[in-house]
């Protein structure tokens, strides 16, 4: 094993995690990871079925004496969010993740780690390979393309699974059982902008960086900065005070990640460089004060760049910048029933300039269908007022919490037996595949649990080593008692 993973327990889980970390598995590019799982199933002589989009189901018979137990499903997703810090040299299509150990935590060297959902998948593979767990009949479902919008789960067919119980291994807090989640929708706005030859002047790249980012559901209430809104407001200040021409604006990386970085290319008479830098520095200080300890690493920088041939028409640039500056980002409503749970939110996720088209992607989440629709309508209305065309897509359902279900009762009994107390029941302000798949299998009882993972979807992602051992022991105890 690599030094970071040497001698970690449980070895049955960490050996698979190490191998997955060496396999590039960005969303929609999970083929090699799926082949790894399939090769293990073939080696073990287990039945497997692959659907049309690449989701993989594997079935394992019960241990002798447990044939009469209800069938249980273990489920995780093969893909990972691919984020890296500026300046980190890493190609997610070919390079393995460089795993680093920091006391009781594992992280990656400047990139996302892939513990979401690599640890859950590794635990499922360890169960698949085990010969000492007295489990009943099992199904394993390894889905694709979860991180870009649950599309693998959305395409998964009904009628294929036979399980009574659904154990999702994608929760990220030890000591909790997740029994519900929000639904979501993506709202995309596009505008064709006019281009004209750039005036005489020099070019600068304005960058927003150093923000924490994070998961757009789990971390949306943390008060962290949004690089796109900050960029929009900085550019607004410049347009109000200087004859700045804007060529392009790009930022964010995924609809389910809070954007950490953004960049804009501008043209300005070089005699006014100091004015521009002074305005940017003043804005940076203001945002640093506003964010405080929530996101203390913010930087807004100005660097000389190659001069472009064309810039946006002034009206198009001003309205695009205004939209970035005013689009809401963050919590819209808290749950009246579950203390501390976000009920409805919106994430200003990405902006990109592709030739004559500016595209802005946002996502809305809610545990309540009508609230999710209202949030998406609000965002669409603002975008349309700014002259953008809007479309909605990637919608997925939520998962209604059933705290008194048989599966929750059983898992609470096992949690108390192993840890001395029942788990905390939670619902998650994020999309889980339970909601999407469960909708196609009415009556299947669902629950989600896992180890402690902090800051998923960002290069700060890390997993607590000791929590993985507890997670593994709990999973084995549950399987032996279902």
Image: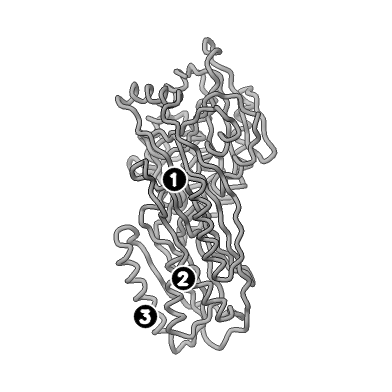
Q: Mark 1 or 3, which is nearer the eye?
A: 1
Q: Residue at x 63, y 37 (%)?
A: 156
x, y (%) of residue 222?
36, 53
**Mark 1 or mark 3, earlier in chain:** 3
Q: Name the residue carrying label 3.
A: 278
Q: Name the residue carrying label 1.
A: 429
Q: Which mark is residue 268?
A: none
**Mark 3 or mark 2, earlier in chain:** 2
Q: Residue at x 60, y 34 (%)?
A: 440
Q: Are marks 3 and 2 in contact (CB under 8 Å)?
A: no
Locate residue 273: give its quadrant.
Answer: bottom left
Q: Residues within 10 Å of mark 3 (few under 14, many from 20)?
A: few
Q: Name the residue carrying label 2.
A: 232
Q: Residue at x 55, y 27 (%)?
A: 443
Quick one: SS at disc 1? Answer: loop
x, y (%) of residue 216?
45, 52
Of the pair 105 and 433, the residue shown nearer to us: 433
**Mark 1 or mark 2, earlier in chain:** 2
Q: Residues within 10 Å of mark 2 (few under 14, many from 20)?
A: many
Q: Mark 1 or 2, which is nearer the eye?
A: 1
Quick one: SS at disc 3? Answer: helix
Q: Are marks 1 and 2 in contact (CB under 8 Å)?
A: no
Q: Are marks 1 and 3 in contact (CB under 8 Å)?
A: no
Number of labels in the image equals 3
Above or below 17: residue 273: below
Separation of disc 1 and disc 3 at Cα? 40 Å
Separation of disc 1 and disc 2 at Cα? 27 Å
């Amino acid at each position: 094993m690599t030094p970071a993973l040497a001698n970690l327990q449980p070895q049955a889980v960490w050996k698979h995690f190490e191998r997955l970390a060496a396999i590039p598995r960005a969303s929609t590019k999970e083929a090699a990871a799926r082949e790894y799982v399939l090769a293990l199933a073939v080696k073990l002589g287990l039945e497997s079925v692959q659907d049309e989009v690449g989701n993989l189901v594997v079935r394992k018979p019960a241990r002798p004496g447990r044939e009469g137990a209800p069938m249980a499903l273990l489920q995780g997703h093969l893909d990972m969010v691919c984020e890296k810090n500026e300046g980190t040299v890493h190609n997610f299509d070919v390079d393995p993740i460089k795993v680093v150990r920091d006391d009781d935590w594992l992280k990656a060297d400047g990139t996302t780690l892939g513990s979401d959902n690599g640890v859950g998948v590794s635990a499922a593979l360890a169960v698949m390979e085990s010969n000492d767990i007295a489990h009943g009949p099992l199904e394993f479902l390894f889905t694709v393309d979860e991180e870009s919008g649950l599309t693998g789960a959305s395409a998964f067919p009904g009628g294929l699974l036979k399980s009574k119980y659904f154990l999702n291994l994608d929760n990220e807090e030890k000591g909790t059982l997740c029994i519900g989640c929000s639904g979501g929708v993506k709202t995309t706005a596009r505008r064709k902008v006019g281009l004209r030859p750039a005036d005489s002047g020099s070019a600068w790249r304005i960058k927003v960086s150093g923000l924490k980012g994070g998961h757009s559901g789990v971390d949306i209430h943390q008060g962290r900065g949004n690089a796109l809104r900050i960029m929009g407001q900085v550019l607004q200040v410049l347009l109000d005070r200087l004859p700045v021409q804007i060529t392009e604006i790009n930022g964010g990386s995924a609809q389910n990640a809070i954007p950490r970085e953004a960049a804009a290319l501008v043209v300005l008479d070089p005699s006014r460089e100091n004015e521009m830098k002074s305005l940017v520095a003043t804005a940076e200080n203001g945002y640093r004060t506003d964010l405080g300890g929530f996101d203390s690493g913010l930087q807004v920088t100005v660097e000389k760049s190659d001069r472009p041939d064309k810039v946006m028409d002034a009206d198009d640039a001003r309205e695009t910048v205004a939209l970035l500056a005013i689009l809401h980002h963050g919590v819209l409503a808290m749950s009246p029933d579950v203390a501390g749970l976000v009920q409805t939110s919106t994430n200003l996720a990405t902006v990109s300039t592709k030739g004559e088209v500016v595209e802005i992607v946002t996502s809305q989440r809610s545990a309540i269908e009508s609230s999710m629709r209202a949030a998406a309508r609000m965002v669409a209305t603002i975008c349309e007022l700014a002259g953008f065309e809007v479309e909605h897509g990637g919608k997925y359902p939520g998962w209604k919490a059933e705290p008194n279900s048989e599966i929750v009762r059983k898992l609470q009994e096992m949690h108390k037996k192993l840890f001395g107390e029942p788990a905390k029941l939670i619902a998650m302000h994020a999309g889980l595949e339970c909601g999407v798949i469960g909708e196609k299998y009415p009556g299947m009882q669902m629950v989600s649990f896992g180890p402690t993972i902090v800051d998923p979807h960002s290069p700060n992602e890390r997993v607590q080593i000791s929590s993985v051992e507890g997670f593994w022991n709990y999973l084995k105890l549950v399987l032996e008692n279902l």
